[in-house]
Image (spheres, rainbow, N blue to C red):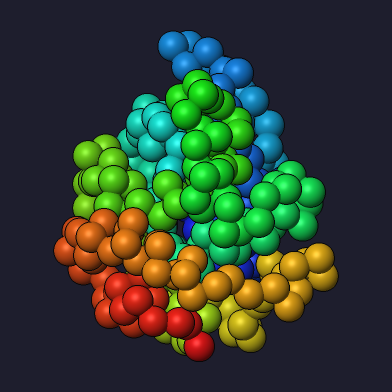
Amino acid sequence: MQKGGTTTLDAFLCEHPELTAAIVKELHFFDDETIDWNKPNYSKLELHFTRSINGERFDVTPVYAYWPDSIERIKAYNPRAKLIYIFRDPFDRAWSHWCMFHARKIEDLSFAEAIRDGRKRMESLPPKAEKRKVYSYVERGLYADQVRRALANFPRKQLLFLRFEDLIRDHRATLAVIAQFLNIGPFPYSELKRINRRNPVTDGMKPAQADRELMYDLLRDDVLEFARLTGLDVSNWATVLRTPAD
């Protein structure tokens, strides 16, 4: 099993007795461009799992959904894999993305600059340059292509598309859907887990309304197409409404 999503879900998956996590989070195996993908050596991947495996193995590396060829590589490795995608409003995703890299001092532009002229930084980069994972604040919110890629490589029954807000608002109901999808028993009773907390460096920062309006202009049509492909309700997403989030 492979999936894209958030570490909030990862914490729940780690507690399920029928699932086995990798020994490190976010393996970044299928987006590793140092691997010879004409003759991939999967032993590097296998080393991240213990020899005694109880149930299905899983890895949480969200960039797989966006990174070129990652989904095709997963299919080549295991065409029976089940993929879980958790999507949030593209603007919220971009803001969280920027906060993380800004706090780590990897990004020195302001958020407003990063989603405007900062996008030009990718023009001189090779298609699979590592820095594309940092500068793609807007591009990683183009969800429709990510869904099309998933549907082109895996049967629909092996794909589960979820909304991040549903996991936050009613995690038990969302976990029940996941358990049914994976054909495993119910998840153990647990309270909501919030693993990725804001770094103090970015605490108190807020994006401007002009930034929200820019993302609306850039992504609204793509979000609506994404909703058509997945059947997910995006009517309350700021990228659709062009209104400030609460």
Vertical relation: 34 (above or below) 142:
above
Q: Residue furthest left?
A: 228
Q: Nearer the viewer, residue 75 or 100?
A: 100
* Residue 144 drawn at (x, y percent): 27, 52
Q: Nearer the viewer, residue 92 or 85?
A: 92
Q: Nearer the viewer, residue 219 or 141?
A: 219
Name the image quarter holding residue 99.
bottom right
Q: Nearer the viewer, residue 87 or 118?
A: 118
Residue 215 falls left or right of residue 122: left
Residue shown at the point (70%, 47%) measured from the top left? 107
Residue shown at the point (45%, 52%) measured from the top left? 138
Residue 88 falls left or right of residue 62: left
Residue shown at the point (35%, 51%) measured from the top left? 142
* Residue 6 drawn at (x, y percent): 56, 61
Residue shown at the point (46%, 25%) measured from the top left? 127
Vertical relation: 186 (above or below) 182:
below
* Residue 102 drawn at (x, y percent): 72, 54
Whether residue 21 is visible, yes or no, is yes
Vertical relation: 121 (above or below) 126:
below
* Residue 198 drawn at (x, y percent): 72, 70
Whether residue 158 is visible, yes or no, is no
Name the image quarter holding residue 214.
bottom left
Residue 234 falls left or right of residue 14: left
